[in-house]
Image: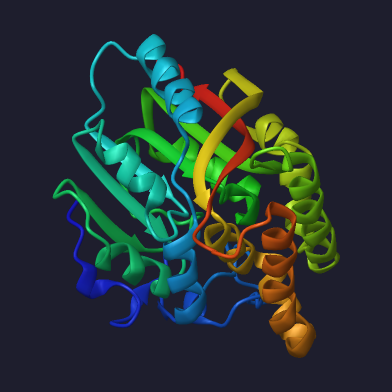
Amino acid sequence: MTYDNSSLPGAGYLCVSCKTRCCCILLPALLTVPGHPSMATQLFEGKEHAAVYQKYRFAPGEELQQTILTYLREKRANPAELVVDVGCGSGQGTRFLAEHFKKVVGTDISEAQIQEARDAPSPPNISYLVCPAEELPFEDASVDLLASFTAAHWFDIEKFMREANRVVKPGGCVIISTYTRDMSLRYGNCSEKLTEVFREAWDLLLKYMHSRVKHVLEDYKEIFEAMPFPDKKRITNIFDKIPMTVAGVIGYLESVSPYQAFMKSDPKAAKSFLPETEKRMLETMGVSSRETPVEFWVRHVCVLACKGQ
């Protein structure tokens, strides 16, 4: 199979299920298509939001990376030839995978996110495609590793798992991870108070949480149970330290889906929310520069599975 980007959205995408030049996946965020057989929830699609996502979303941390690589070493005798990162967003996880595997394809339903990924510096073994997670343009049993980082809760889980079962080779693996709400900030002797400020901000944003975020709050339990391969496990206690600045923490909050919903619901309050949160953080830390480094700790959940031979 060849990957001709000219046939993808913008030039007209041939929907696997509709058998038409379907423009469904270009609709605005938060819309679904009634009667469409495989539409996932659509967010992160605007150009401005995609740019924020690229700038402030962080790559998989060291502990998560090692968890994934250790599992793959245990399961595979031969190196993976084709790796697919589904729901790749602006490519943070895709670039991590490209450091370790021969050919990596990042896919996302958002054309704006894929454009951000393509514009970012990337190694030559990465390519990107616009397509739904439930309709992957890969042949049966052609993918060695199917991965997804902090995205699977937006998919139609049943259809995605069916698609994963179709495209993954016998003996191939699936890795699905997300970072959780369990986050903390550390700085000098004010770490507890700083974390309290951050969590109060999150509590406000969660009022605007999409229902699908429940999968994250439940540590991907339902996603784990839906995995069609019996050889599977779920690890819920992976902790990573992510290098951040105060500006980076505020940018991360701006990038999350509840904030985008907050902006739609109450733009005035949403626009003041970020500078107010930043001010509280700086005052708590006793510093004036938003470029002041902080330790950003996050707990990951990871579902790992291997398809039988």
Q: Quadrant of residue 2?
A: bottom left
Q: Quadrant of residue 99?
A: top left
Relative side of 296 to 279, left or right: left
Which residue is pictured at 39% across the width and 73% down the height?
111
Relative image position of residue 154 (x, y in whole percent): 62, 56
Q: Residue furthest bottom?
A: 268
Relative side of 227 to 113, left or right: right
Relative image position of residue 17 (x, y in whole percent): 48, 65
Relative image position of residue 178 (x, y in whole percent): 60, 41
Residue 19 visible in rendering = no
Which residue is pictured at 70% across the width and 59% down the height?
281
**Which is more toward the observer, 133 or 65?**
65
| Above or below, 12 relative to 246 | below
Which residue is pictured at 22% across the width and 53% down the height?
122
| Above or below, 112 relative to 151 | below
**Which is more toward the observer, 60 or 308?**
60
Q: In which quarter of the image is the C terminus?
A: top left
